Amino acid sequence: MGFKKFTSDMGSRNCVKWLRSAIFCIFIIFLLCSPLYGAIQEESSLAWPRTVQDDQQQLVTVSSEPHRIISLAPSNTEVLFALGLDDRIVGVTDYCNYPAAALEKDRIGGFSTVSIEKVVALHPDLVIASGGNNQEAVDRIKELKIPVYYADARSLDEIYTTIEKIGYITGTSEKASSIISNLKAREEIVRKEGETVSKKPIVAHVIWYDPIYVSGKGTFQDELIQIAGGVNAFSDKNGHAIANIEEFISKNPDIIVVNSGSGMGSDTVDMKEYFMTEPRLSRLSAIVSDKIIVVDSDIADRAGPRLWDLLEEIAPKIRGE
C-alpha cells in the first residue's frame, strides 16, 4: 500500500509540474503575440529591425534607426516635429507649413502630386505616407524598397496610435509616450468640464461652403464637439459629407464652427461671411445670436497634436463661457 501511495504521489507531483510548465509556455506565447499598442515602450531602444502594422494593415519593417525621413502630408510632418525629429526630416510636401522649420525642408511636390524623382533624390530610409496621397506614388516608392508607413488616423485614439507607432519605428518611443500622456491628460480635463453642461448646444462644423461640407460621425471634429460639451448637428452623416441649405435650416444649430480656409495652408476664404450674408440662413439660431466660431483650417483638418490646442480653444465657447 505504501509503495502504491508513493507512486500515486509522484504521479500527482509530475502532473502539477507539467501543468505549471504548460501555463508558463502559454504565458510566454501570449507575451510574444500580444498587440503592439501599449507595449512597444517596453522594447529595448537598441532593438532593430522593428516592424509595425500601418493603417493599410501592411507590415512595415525598418532595418535600422532612420536618419533620412520624408513626410508626404502636413499632419505627418507635425507629428515628426513633435517627436523631435527635426534634423532627420529631409523632405516634405508643398503644404507642410508648420512648424516654421518645415518651410526650410526640401519639397517633394503636392499632397496628391508627389514627385517620385524628388523622393528618390533625397535618399530616404523612411517615408511617412497618408490617406490623401496618390496610391500609385506610394506603391512606386515601396517598389523601390524604401520603407513606407501609411498613416490615416480618423479619430483621436488613432492619432495616439500613430504617434506611438511612428515613435517606435523612429526610435523616439519615450518622447511619443510623453506626448500621448500629456494629450490624454488635457483631453480628460476638457471632457470632465464638458460633462457639467446641463443643456448641450447643437454644433455644426463646416469645412467648406460651395457646396457645404460638414463633419459627421466618425471624424475627429465630431469627437472634439462631444468632448467639449456639445452635440454634433450632423451626427447622422458619416464622415465628411455634403449638407444642403434645407438640412441646415432643419438642424438649426446653436453654434457653427467654420474653417478659415481649405486646410491646405494657402486659401483665405471667409466662410463666416458666407453664413452671415446668406439670406436663406438668416433665421438660424447661430446666425441670430452671432455664434460662429472661426478656426484655423490647418489645425482643424490635420490629424496631429494641435487638435488638442483646438479642443481647448473651442470648448469654453461651446460651453458658453
Image (cartoon, rainbow, N blue to C red):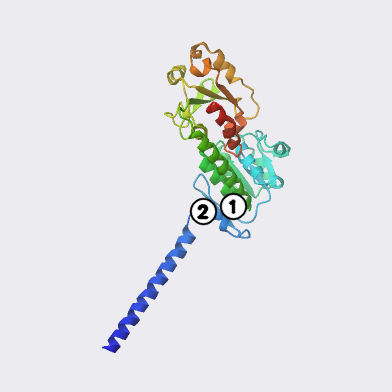
Neighbour tally class for label 1: few under 14, some 14-19, many 20 plus, Cα within 10 Å: many
Residue 151 in sight in this render: no
At label 1, the amino acid type is Tyr
Tell me the quarter of the image containing the N terminus.
bottom left
Neighbour tally class for label 2: few under 14, some 14-19, many 20 plus, Cα within 10 Å: some
Residues at marks 2 and 1 touching, judged by CB atoms closer than 8 Å: yes
Q: Name the residue beneath numbered marker 2.
A: 36
State the residue in front, 185 or 209.
185
Residue closest to the far left: 1
Vertical position of residue 151 compared to residue 270: above or below: below
* Mark with earlier residue (2, 1): 2
Measuring from the top left, give residue 154's x and y in whole percent.
51, 38
Measuring from the top left, give residue 311's x and y in whole percent.
57, 34
Q: Secondary structure at mark 2?
A: loop
Vertical position of residue 229 compared to residue 7: above or below: above
Judge from the rendering whether residue 153 lies leftward or rightward of residue 171; answer left or right.
Answer: left
Residue sitting at 58 percent across and 31 percent down? 300
Residue 25 in sight in this render: yes
Residue sitting at 65 percent across and 33 percent down? 95
At label 2, the amino acid type is Leu
**Which of the 4 image quarters holds residue 290?**
top right
Measuring from the top left, give residue 259's x and y in whole percent.
58, 26
Measuring from the top left, give residue 227's x and y in whole percent.
50, 35
Residue 168, numbered label: 1
Judge from the rendering whether residue 111 lies leftward or rightward of residue 225; answer left or right.
Answer: right
Q: CA distance from mark 2 to mark 1?
A: 10 Å
Q: Secondary structure at mark 1?
A: helix
